Image: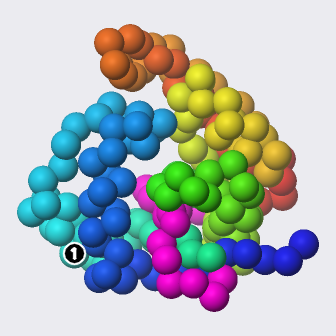
Amino acid sequence: MKERVLLTALRDDDLEVLFQWVNDPALVRFSASYKPVHWKNHVEWFDSLEEKDTTIIFGIRPIGDKKLIGFCKLVNMHRVCRSAEMQIKIGDRAYLSQGYGSEALGLLLRFAWDDLNLHRVYCYVFADNERAIKLYEKFGFLREGVMREAAFIDGEYKDIIIMGILRDGS
């Protein structure tokens, strides 16, 4: 299959679109409760990315296009245990449900295994986010547990599923 996306460093000109996504309640509710982010705080977050040695974040871009359509990251990296939490978001709705997130996840996992020599990658996903769960299972993530009613979103409690994959695919 022909590759359609690249994982790239985030650039200063991505700041505005990232700010729009973090302040879009519909996008945020896939992974967290919504809380408006102020520009100053957003800039501080962006500027701090280079200083964090436990976080690696990539922009997701179509090949041949500089447009940012999403991002993915490895956070809470533990160098001794060789594990990290994975997060991914396609922020540009025009690119949802077309396989871009799937391709980006494959590239991120390849980076985690080959470049970082990680042993385990895990993620947290709302139990009702069926699209994300299907994607993770397609790559071999297993359900490792459920945190019951661990998030309060739009007036209701939601379960959070912990999913993980080991380097050998188990």
Residue span colored magenta: 63-82
Check disc 1 and give the amino acid type: Asp
Residue 141's quadrant in the figure? top right
Which residue corresponds to the image point at 63% horizontal and 88% vertical from the top-left? Answer: 64
Quadrant where the N terminus sits is bottom right
How far across and how far down the image is residue 125, in percent?
A: 56, 35
Which residue corresponds to the image point at 45% horizontal and 38% vertical from the top-left? Answer: 31
Does 72 appear in magenta? yes
Which residue corresponds to the image point at 27% horizontal and 48% vertical from the top-left? Answer: 23
How far across and how far down the image is residue 107, in percent?
A: 70, 70
**Rendered view: 26 above or below 152:** below
Residue reaching furthest front? Answer: 94
Residue 119's quadrant in the figure? bottom right
Residue reaching furthest bottom? Answer: 64
Does 20 appear in magenta? no
Q: Is residue 76 visible?
A: yes
Q: Which residue is mark 1?
A: 47
Say which element carries label 1: helix
